[in-house]
Amino acid sequence: MRILVVGGGGREHALVWKLAQSPRVKEIYCAPGNAGIAGSAKCVSLDANDIQGLKAFALEQHIDLTVVGPEEPLTLGIVDEFEAVGLRVFGPGREAARMEGSKVFAKKIMQQAGVPTAAYREFTDHEEARAYVTRLNGPVVIKADGLAAGKGVFPCRTTDQALEALQRIMVEREFAEAGDNVVVEDFLVGEEASFICLTDGETVVPLPSSQDHKPIFDNDEGPNTGGMGAYSPAPVVTPELHSLVMKKVMQPVVDALRENGIRFKGILYAGLMISDGVPNILEFNVRMGDPETQPILFRLKSDLVELMEAVIDERLHEVTIDLDPQPTICVVMAAGGYPGSYKKGLPIAGLDKAAALTDTMVFHAGTRQE
Ligand code: AMP
Ligand code: GLY
């Protein structure tokens, strides 16, 4: 098989690494990839959002399976575009991807499916939103409806913070039309975990639980990052909680989408907030997490190509997942200063030594060979 992976971060490096282990895979391309990915795939200089370019490439190169890493091409409809010309592609279509692309849409589906989530109100009018948060006079979370590269969520402890968030989203329009609608929801407390599943729109098969770690410093201190690491499993996801989430969240959401005429095929990822063993859903994503993918795929013994094909062909009920019980951990090494401004182009040394370790793998993000 000839495979194309779309994206170029640590998640995509892990996907390429895992897909390359399948005996069915002959050649892997990655667009745009990175210096680490170039070790096991041919990097193609196409942007992950260049859907027409990617489609032309996949047709030309007779790609048998395209795997989409990030959310943006999914919300832009890469899957619909590929399927329309007979290309096989792993990921949800444009409508299904609204589970991540629109917080309002995700909230509505959650409500319909009876999923536990923070109480919320939706606003398009700045004055009405101001009046609401002023009346609440307590901690709230303000969210721009659309994709905002992870920056559109504002947990606000005070009304002043909430008013400022509304100002930035609705008046200064920091996220452009992604801020046309705003969700104001209750501030939840607890411990977060990532619950990531495969689904073919009917059957839901969970991947191992994981937890990512956002603040830059130890002890959850300092500003949030894209994730300083992740481990799997997440001990906070007990077997009881696991079966509760499958029964009360994942399956009902997939069923509710189907009842709305949307067959969700791909990865469905629920962000959980757990307090006293009770989960609330913070958000849905429609792709693997980064950096959760790295420790999750390290534990997956099954052939990922087989699993993805079972999703595409709507026969996920036939598969079982084989996992390594050994826990895994991913630690992110970033340039000093991150997530603020930091020096770029710094050399990385020691990769050969790391490559000699048997139970360790270095995944790259933002690297380049020089
Ligand atoms: P989201 O993109 O909706 O997951 O939000 C990003 C992050 O904001 C989450 O991982 C949480 O840390 C935080 N967050 C989102 N919603 C809430 C909420 N209702 N209460 C507390 N924190 C939240
Ligand atoms: N690690 C969080 C995410 O991928 O959304």
Image (cartoon, rainbow, N blue to C red):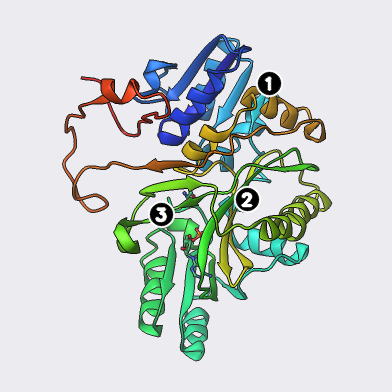
Rounded to the nearest angstrom, the CA distance separating label 2 from label 1 is: 22 Å
Q: Which residue is mark 1?
A: 85
Q: Nearer the viewer, residue 359 or 205?
A: 359
**Disc 2 versus disc 1: nearer the observer:** 2
Label 1: which secondary element = loop
- The image position of residue 279, as x and y in percent, is 63, 66
Q: Which residue is mark 2?
A: 98
- The image position of residue 173, as x and y in percent, is 39, 63
Q: Nearer the viewer, residue 213 or 239?
A: 239
Question: In the rendered structure, which disc, 3 or 1, sits on the residue that comes first in sequence?
Answer: 1
Q: Residues within 10 Å of mark 1 (few under 14, many from 20)?
A: few
Question: In the rendered structure, which disc, 2 or 1, sits on the residue that comes first in sequence?
Answer: 1
154 left or right of 195 in image: left
Q: Residue 213, which numbered label?
A: 3
Q: Is residue 157 above or below residue 178?
A: below
Label 3: which secondary element = loop
Residue 74 in sight: yes
Q: Residues within 10 Å of mark 3 (few under 14, many from 20)?
A: many
Q: Nearer the viewer, residue 349 or 7?
A: 349
Q: Residues within 10 Å of mark 2 (few under 14, many from 20)?
A: many
- The image position of residue 11, as x and y in percent, is 46, 35
Q: Is residue 157 above or below residue 370?
A: below
